[in-house]
Amino acid sequence: MGGNNMGLENKSFRKFTDEVCSQVKCAEMHEDIKEELNCHLQELEEEYIAQGSTCEEASKLAVAHMGDSEKIGFDLNKIYQRRPDYKTLFICSIFIAIGLLVQFSIYKNAPKIISYNDYMKMIILTILGGILGVVVYFLDYRKLEKYSWQLFIAATILIGLIIFFGKYVNGNRNIIFLGTAFDLSTIASVLYIISLCGLITKVYHSKYGILKLLLMICFSGYSILLTNQEVSFVIYCVLIVGLLMYSGIPKKLILLMLALGTFSICTFIFSATYRFHRFISIFIFARKGDMNMDYVVGKIQLLLSNSKFIGNGISKEVISTTPLINVNFIFTYIIYSFGWIVGITILIMITLLLFNLFKTSKNIKNSYGKLLFKSITLALTIQFLLPIMSNLNLISSLYISMPFIGYNGSSVIMNMVLIGLICGIYGRKNLSKSLASSSSSIVTQPE
């Protein structure tokens, strides 16, 4: 095919695809749509040439065969219209409303537990989290992949801030800013995972990839351990196992890396007695000899045993005598005050939320987006699971709040941003191309 004909072909095809895309509001889809349309046009052109048409005639006939560009664009706009996951937004909105109402009941009946300023601060942080979530939704999530190393460094900086400037608040080492304790360790854990979503297969396919990947995993794990926040470390471990499984790396190599990583981290934990005792306390019923923890465990057990199906009503005494009831043990308070019926309803809603997210992840075409979506879903799962088990006395009492419901400003902001991110991924679920320089680096992921 001569250069002039090729120019004519490109011009006519380009005009047609531009007209189609002018009707599609989701600009991120334009490149994928143009590529697909060009493939169809080229196939039609080849058929007409085989039938004896000239290149110029074949190009025109191919465009004519496709039909009205405006109608095609209108139909494609319906298909590729960017919409958030309304089921996820609806359930999370209910959780936020429940959290604000329950915190208000605590504020009104026990001002010493949560003051007016604390309650207003929670509302402000919730609004801020919502705004950031909306901003993240409108951003093209694929741009995150290009900044994966920067996110890894940012997570490490957060760890450094905790180590050098962190103060213990309610059992956790946090950063105090404007009178609010921010749990940067959990945020750093999630940031490490988000960064590794964009790095894991690139590093794996590079020279000495397995060794580099192992060093990155151990480095981030050690960093989190240095903050003395064992819950954040457990969250990180669960997320890294899930990420390795989702990435499509061969299972034998995953087992090898997990074995080496576990050995290295266990060596670090057992090298100091205090680290061992702090870490193992998560997996036993209560910290032996810790009178404060024994009291909390006993108090939770008492509240659960006295809980009724329709609730006991709000008790000022219970609010005043139960440590951290508005933060870490909010679910126990809900069951005792409003009944098992409300507690079970919340559990059902959490199950529906997580089931919907895991199901939705199968519809994401972009491999990086799918890996990111699944990792965030797993992060939300472990954040719900740990406080629920702790509040039901199934594991040792942990210093971790329930997402959207417990009084924890940094957790509310982080999780609302994560919800905005997965809604953004869902709204662009038909995108297949990567914006990273090496778009083919992600391994095809198993369903």
Image (tube, grey):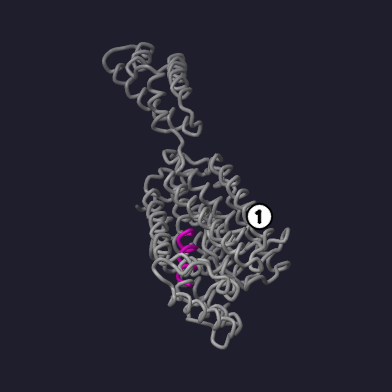
Give the quadrant of residue 346.
bottom left
The residue that label 1 is drawn on is 120
Q: Residue 389 in the image: x percent, y percent?
A: 45, 71
Residue 218 image point, x, y percent: 55, 68
Q: Residue at x 58, y 63 (%)?
A: 186
* Residue at the extreme bottom: 289
Which residue appears at 49% of the width and 55% of the height?
Answer: 95
Q: Residue furthest left?
A: 51
Q: Measured from the top left, where is residue 202 in percent x and y?
A: 51, 52
**Residue in the foreground of this view, choosing between 325 and 433:** 325
Q: Is residue 356 magenta?
A: no
Q: Is residue 43 above or below residue 373?
A: above
Q: Which residues are magenta?
A: 379-390
Q: Amino acid at mark 1?
A: Met
Instruction: Locate residue 15 relative to residue 226 in the image: left or right.
Output: left
Residue at 60% x, 56% y: name it: 152
